[in-house]
Image (spheres, helix red, strand yellow):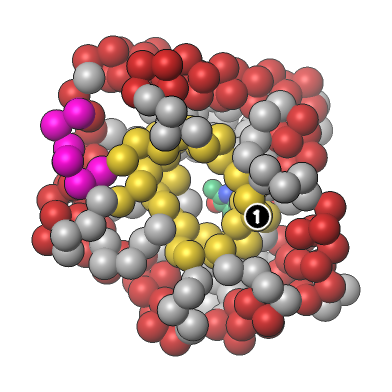
Amino acid sequence: MAIKEVISQLRESLPNHVQLIAISKTHPAEMIAEAYEAGQRAFGENRPKEMKEKYEALPKDIEWHMIGHLQTNKIKYIAPFVKLIHSIDSDNLLACIDKEAAKHNRVIDVLLEVHLAREESKSGWSADELDTYIASGKFKEYKNIRLRGMMTVGSLTDNMNIVEQEFRTLKQMQERYRDMIGEEFDTVSMGMTSDYELAIECGSNMVRIGSMIFGARDYSK
Ligand SMILES: *Cc1c(COP(=O)(O)O)cnc(C)c1O
């Protein structure tokens, strides 16, 4: 199916409270432009330089979402324009983003990424580390950052019971932290091509869908 058709169908099928982030990593600007023509405005990337190049080449009303592990020396590429960083995994990263955001007189919205899957490869805080961090209140020092919610990547498994458990846990964490942080801590970013419907059932309000829209990714280039 063509990109435009998938986008239109997805946008029709998703509940109104769920935002679709089209994950365009590795794909060329031309493919993003096609999704844009179908009305899509929010795109996700995992490499800062690639995001910056696409930002420069494409219409300026696109919202750019950073979904990949972010090295502190690369924040500068995206700080002037990024809409939401989903992948906060340390206090140090928050401190560095706060500094870069201040240089541009911006307040940057971010999500806390938590590692609930059993796989070692996944990045993010452990649930225990994050509990301790939120209780410490240290994030309140950062005036150029707004904590907006939580993100996770579900386990890569056919056993949807495991994935469901992770998604329910993420939603519970978001509700618990919202009571401590404030009403603006309202975003639950979970669900990809293989599990977004389950994620929505479990309380997701932001899904990150790549291969269903753009096809398989080629990492050989
Ligand atoms: C690549 C990626 C996605 C999109 O995955 P698909 O299975 O292609 O939909 C979503 N979230 C993160 C964090 C990713 O790295």
Toward which corner of the image does residue 33 lie, by quadrant? bottom right
In the displayed structure, would residue 122 be above or below residue 98?
A: above
Direction from residue 109 to residue 120 in the image, left or right? right
Q: Which residue appears at 84% of the width and 73% of the height?
A: 5
On the image, numbered disc 1 is attached to which residue? 20
Residue 22 in sight in this render: yes
Magenta span of residues: 140-145
**Circle 1 — which element?**
strand
Direction from residue 8 to residue 46 in the image, left or right? left
Q: Position of residue 40 (x, y in %)?
A: 65, 69
Q: Nearer the viewer, residue 54 or 61?
A: 61
Q: Which residue appears at 22% of the width and 29% of the height?
A: 139
Q: Which residue appears at 71% of the width and 61% of the height?
A: 211
Count residues near mark 1 (Cα–Cα under 10 Å), then give few for <14, some for 14-19, many for 20+. many
Residue with the most extreme right position: 1
Q: Position of residue 205 (x, y in %)?
A: 63, 40
Direction from residue 208 to residue 86 in the image, left or right? left
Direction from residue 106 to residue 44 in the image, left or right? right
Q: Nearer the viewer, residue 129 or 56?
A: 56
